[in-house]
Every structure is written in C-alpha cells, then in structure tokens.
Image: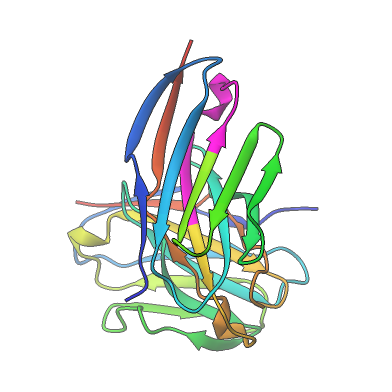
Amino acid sequence: KNQVEQSPQSLIILEGKNCTLQCNYTVSPFSNLRWYKQDTGRGPVSLTIMTFSENTKSNGRYTATLDADTKQSSLHITASQLSDSASYICVVGPWGIKAAGNKLTFGGGTRVLVKP
Amino acid sequence: EAGVAQSPRYKIIEKRQSVAFWCNPISGHATLYWYQQILGQGPKLLIQFQNNGVVDDSQLPKDRFSAERLKGVDSTLKIQPAKLEDSAVYLCASSLWGRVGETQYFGPGTRLLVL
C-alpha cells in the first residue's frame, strides 16, 4: 500500500531559527516528490518538486532534499519567519504516463508554528 | 491569472441533510480533482475528471456522494444524505492535463460541519 509518513506531527520554533521536517514514503514506482505549504483556511500551494534523479531543490528559504534509495525526503526552513506558520505536506506521485497516473499520495502534514 | 474558485467557503448542516459544493478551475485546465481533508490529515482524492469524463472515482462513497462536470469546466460535488463523519474541508484542484509531475493548483476549500 502506498503511504507517506511525516514527522514530527507538529513543532514550535522561535522566529529566526531553522527547522527540518521529515518525510518517509513507500510509494512505488516513484516519479516525483513535492512539498506543499498549506496556510490555515487555504488550499495547499506547491513549494518544491523533485524527480527521482534530483537530490535537492530550493525555493527561497525552503530547501528540500531527496534520497530515493532510502525513500526519505526533508524540508529545511532557514531563518524562519512568522509567515512560515502553516502545515507542510509531503506528496508523492507515482510513475505513469496517463492522466490517472497523476494520482498523488499525501502525507498527514507537519504543523509548524513560528513564535516571535 | 485567476486561481481555483470554490463556494461556499463554509457550510453547517444537520446529519441526513444534503449539501452541494461548487468549483471553477483555472481557465484551460482539463483536469479537475475533488479532495476530502479531515482535520489533521492530508487530502484524500475523491474523484478526478479529465474534461467531462471521470478518470478515477475509486475512493468516492458513491452511496452518498456524487459529482459532475457536465460541460468540462466547473464542477459540483454533492453529499446526500450527510453523516457526521463527512465533516471536513473539501478541496478542489485543477491541473493542465493531469500528467505525471504536473502541478495541481488548489482552491481555498469549503469547510463542512455536520451536526
């Protein structure tokens, strides 16, 4: 069964500090891994996407890493800001070429709260 | 570029009542998705449309949920009758062709509370 597990479930950090979120997946065959940010009351917004051949991808203060051998990914937030308070969802896409192949497997998310 | 629009934003109903949600995807996007997101969990795909055809509805509780996208543009999702466990946020997303790796753009969601 395809699964995506995220840890921790939630964390609190002080503004300006760094933090790292973890994602382990069992989706196979694997095509791509994406991190989404979901603000409270909003829909998820894509932060980064990596294929199985990529190890790292950055988007401003967000850096995602991928180890396709161990099926692990991490999202690192540098110099956190109050606006980083949100849920971060790891999403894995299967391998396929047809429209139905874009069926994604979502993790449960990590809720991050940045305090001043 | 306008994003995915959903309405209403919030809905409170009693169990056994019916409810309908509306979604207007990004213009030109052929693929439309409805997700159910229970509090504290990631979204779960309910149904995927490619234009006006259903691609995947394997996780749609068909005894009470229905969805349509008659003209291949906007879509409605209906629940009849609602149960307490249907309380969740219903997210609509769209993508250009539904191909692997393509970005799905999400709407703000409709938050449903069933009492």
Residue pictured at 57% horizontal, 76% vertical: A102
Is residue B86 toward the left or the right of residue A52 in the image? Answer: left
Nearest the viewer among B90 and B98 is B98
Position of A20 relative to A71 (above/below): above
Q: Residue at x 43, y 72 (%)?
A: A27
Q: Is residue A4 left or right of residue B54?
A: left
Which residue is at a point 37% across and 73% down the rendered structure image? A2
Please tell me whether residue A10 is drawn above or below residue A51 in the rendered image: above
Q: Is residue B69 visible?
A: no
Quarter of the view holding residue A83:
top right
Residue A82 position within the rendered picture, expressed as x and y whole percent measured from the top left: 54, 20
Task: Give the total of numbered labels.
Answer: 0
Locate residue B86, reporting x and y percent: 27, 61
Q: Position of residue A59 (x, y in %)?
A: 70, 41
Which is more toward the observer, B6 or A67? Answer: A67
Considering every residue shown, the one lying at the far right of the view is B1
Residue A75 visible in the picture: yes
Residue at the image point whose x is 42% and y is 83% from the top: B57
Color scheme of the displayed model? rainbow
Whether residue B81 sits left or right of residue A2 in the image: it is left
- Vertical placement of residue B113 versus A116, above or below: below
Closer-to-camera residue (B111/A7): A7
**Residue A31 drawn above or below residue A56:** below
Quadrant placement of the N terminus of chain A? bottom left
The residue positioned farthest toward the front in the image shown: A69
Residue A19 % position (x, y):
48, 29
Residue A87 within the segment the image draws in magenta = yes
Please state the extent of the stretch shown in magenta in the rendering: A76-90
